[in-house]
Amino acid sequence: MQQRMATANNIRQRLQATTNTVVSGQTIRNRLHNFGLRARRPVRGTTLTANHRAARRAWCTQHVRWQRQQWAQVLFTDESRFCLEPADGRIRVWRRRGERFAEGAVLERQRFGGGSVMVWGGISTRRRTPLYHVVGNLTGVRYQNEILQPLVVPALQAIGPRAILQDDNAPPHRSAAVNTFIQQARVNRMLWPAKSPDLNPIEHMWDKLCRRVQQHHPPPANLGQLLQWLQQEWNGVPRAFLCNLIHSMHQRCVKCLAHNGGHTRY
């Protein structure tokens, strides 16, 4: 269906301009409802060009036949930022009609979310790395000295001689210094298609981590406590959950190919 984001009034005006047929917006909505179409909030996704879709198709075609034993060799990594006061649409409040501004029914927030912390982590079916706090801007040199050398290399060695590093195409990850280190350290790095967070299972780990932290009541009082709880919950996520995430890689490839390299539900 083309132009899914057109409103009923947009369709009404277009219909009147092209066929000189006058109908109401409600009539348009009724007809759409008859076809099972309802107005929903769109899923937000990264912009995918034709080149992005082609690269995603090629990557999934190459990996769709991988077995679980092969995916078990991969260390999936990424950075993520967590706000002290996340803008979470899942938060709800119990109130009666007319109590919109009642005491306890208003979610008070500081400007700019009260600050945030950035963390880096890596997961595989066998282990997880420590959750590392990234202070300030992450550069290529810092990525090498603070993450690759002390965290990634030991994790890969623990996985085994066929271990593979997955990291995305962020500029610090692909700097000249990092590329040189990767070669010198003989790290087997997976080529990764751009704009493909849905293919990386660690994204669901971040969502799980956020949900577990939000279960704390009262919420974290400051950034130090937020970081402490993030690291605590990171270590507390069951290993079976990590395995299930990585075991989903085959289905992720299948869905991506089914959507011609486009967005998937992951």
Image: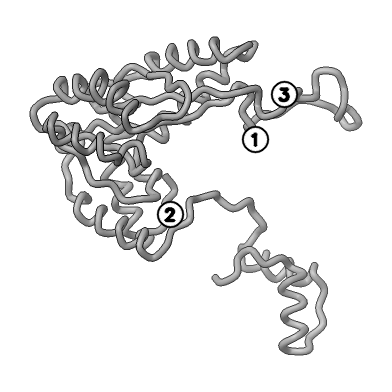
Q: Earlier in the sequence, mark 1 or mark 2?
A: 1
- Determine the secondary structure under disc 1: loop
Q: Residue at x 15, y 33 (%)?
A: 187
Which residue sits furthest right?
98
For this rendering, which residue is in front, 4 or 220?
220
* Amino acid type of the residue that numbered disc 3 sits on in the rendered structure: Gln
Of labels 3 and 2, the one closer to you: 3
Q: Locate residue 247: give its quadrant.
A: top left
Q: Locate residue 217: give its quadrant.
A: top right
* Amino acid type of the residue that numbered disc 2 sits on in the rendered structure: His
Relative to 4, is 135 above or below? above
Relative to 70, is 130 above or below? above
Tell me the distance, in whole angstroms, between the alpha carbons under discs 1 and 3: 16 Å
**Left or right: 12 as drawn, with respect to 4:** right
Label 1: how many Cα within 10 Å (few below 14, some 14–19, many 20+) = few
Tell me the distance, in whole angstroms, between the alpha carbons under discs 3 and 2: 34 Å
- Determine the secondary structure under disc 2: loop
Q: Earlier in the sequence, mark 1 or mark 3?
A: 1
Q: Residue at x 77, y 77 (%)?
A: 13
**Left or right: 61 as drawn, with respect to 233:** left
The residue pinned by badge 2 equals: 263
* Amino acid type of the residue that numbered disc 1 sits on in the rendered structure: Gly
Q: Locate residue 125: give its quadrant.
A: top left
x, y (%) of residue 170? 37, 41
The residue pinned by badge 1 equals: 89
Tell me the number on the disc at residue 110: 3
Tell me the distance, in whole angstroms, between the alpha carbons under discs 1 and 2: 22 Å
Relative to 202, is 212 above or below? above
**Rendered-image quadrant of the N terminus:** bottom right
For this rendering, which residue is in front, 203 or 31?
203
